[in-house]
Amino acid sequence: MLKIREFMRLRFELHLGYQQIGRSCSIAVSTVHKYLRRAEAAGLTWPLPEDWDEARVAAAVFPRSQSLTKGQPPTRTSPDFSAIHEQLRSHKHLTLQLLWEEYREANPDGYRYSRFCELYQRWRSKLDVVLRQEHKAGEKMFVDWAGATIPLYDPLSGQVWQAPLFVAALGASSYTFAEVTRDQQMESWLRAHVHAFEYWGGIPALVIPDNTKTGVTKAHRYDPDLNPTYYNFALHCGFGIVPARPYKPRDKAKVESAVQISQRWIVAVLRHRKFFSLEDLNSAIRELLEKLNHRPFRKREGSRATVFAALDKPALKPLPTEPFDLSEWSRARVNIDYHVAFDANLYSVPYNLVHELVEIRSTPTTVEILHKGTRIASHLRRRGHGHTLTNDEHRPKSHRAHLEWTPSRMVHWAETIGANTARLFERILADKPHPEMGYRGCLGIIRLAQKYSAQRVEAAAERALLTGACRYKSVESILRNSLDRQPLSSSSPPPPSSTPPPHDNIRGAEYFE
């Protein structure tokens, strides 16, 4: 650091020698001599004018034109670090080594690789300035799922499954809430919010979640799509939702810190204990939460609990008087079989909505389907996989008519024509591996009764039974050729025998003797 003013004061005002000035300023005698000689060459006299500070004195003693000597390196072209930084962010496989080589190709006299990296890191460090967020009392609540889980043991089978940990923290006081849930689905997500509000005894103005699917349907930096169920829950409780920006963990730094603390002071503490139910595990977590929130701060007075009582608690809004209707919302497109898929099961809707986009509102007991805000179907919710729930009113008339044709109904209709037609239907249905395989043949004979007459179909059925030609095509051929009007004695062949008639070309057992 230059001390020319001090050198001149000690020399011309106190009349000290060069060695005394050097010891006083902790600098070499030769340097004192050089600086004073330069001040004399620049025409400076003591006392200096009052408006002359150290920088002005240094500029007069060491003018810029004289500061550049022949031994100094030439000026190099400075890299465009802004463009370099943008390229590194856009291309994940790009390296500083390649960018430096491209820089040296354009500037052969440019910086070497080590200096290039040093200058870039120095430039980049100025971008990492963090905005310190100021949190108002009762304003924000930060929520997230912790990365760590806690094992739960089935008391009967001994099977172990990992229970996820939900963590929430208030902005002003960092007052923390945590509990384990059965899964990370919507029902567990909302119940954890409710339990956090009850733990605090109030509701904040804003909730800042991560971009989990239970909170945000489609993440976006500027205009995210909120999950409809989560949005309705926020309307019921009276808070707003401001999701953190994607890949910006500092937007929810409070809960990131709370997650870390919870993993250290809850998950790690419980590592030696075994739990067989969520209730027992959450009871143990509540005890550790009290210790965590009452733990004194290291660098300031008080604890999370005392700051919460002084700031956040009075500013929180009251809890809602009625519980939230815990229902989930989703969207689906109607399949060509006029059913929508939800939770691995199928639910019917009116057939005229095929290919339409509908909304599904589900509760633990019911499934409601809405189209453009109007409810079009309601079903009891089925648990499990592969179930189909169909309302007959949703089917088209042709499908209902087809399903109404049972074997007994077909035989009963045939009896209105005659006994022979009824026996013919029974024979057709009995000859098939499954009765439904004979439905079309019976329905075809019903159509023939409309074309010809019931009396002719009854006569044709009698002839078909006698000849053993119990098929639709046989009956249709009899009617088309008017064989039903001919006497049976003259037109019908003899009934088939169980043994074949003798024939000269058939070799009997004597042939092999």
Image (cartoon, grey):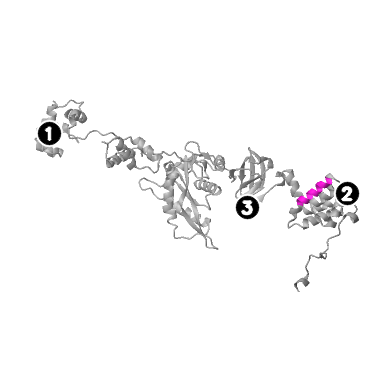
Say which amino acid is labelled 1. Lys
Counting residues from the N terminus, which is met first, the one under dot 3 or under dot 2? 3
Q: Is residue 235 magenta?
A: no
Measured in 3D between alpha carbons, the distance from the residue under mark 3 to the one under mark 1, in whole angstroms, is 94 Å
Image spot of residue 254 (x, y percent): 43, 44
Quarter of the figure that contains the N terminus: top left
Residue at mark 2: 455
Work out which residue is located at the far bottom of the displayed protein and give it.
Answer: 513
Q: Secondary structure at mark 1?
A: helix
Residue at mark 1: 34
Residue at mark 3: 386
Q: Which residues are magenta?
A: 439-450
Counting residues from the N terminus, which is met first, the one under dot 1 or under dot 2? 1
Label for residue 432? none
Say which amino acid is labelled 3. Gly
Q: Secondary structure at mark 2?
A: helix
Asked if residue 440 lies left or right of residue 191, the reply is right
- Report the number of discs: 3
Residue 283 visible in image: yes
Characterize the local packing of mark 1: few (<14), some (14-19) or many (20 or more) Cα atoms within 10 angstroms: few
Measured in 3D between alpha carbons, the distance from the residue under mark 1 to the one under mark 2, in whole angstroms, is 138 Å
| Discs 3/1, front | 3
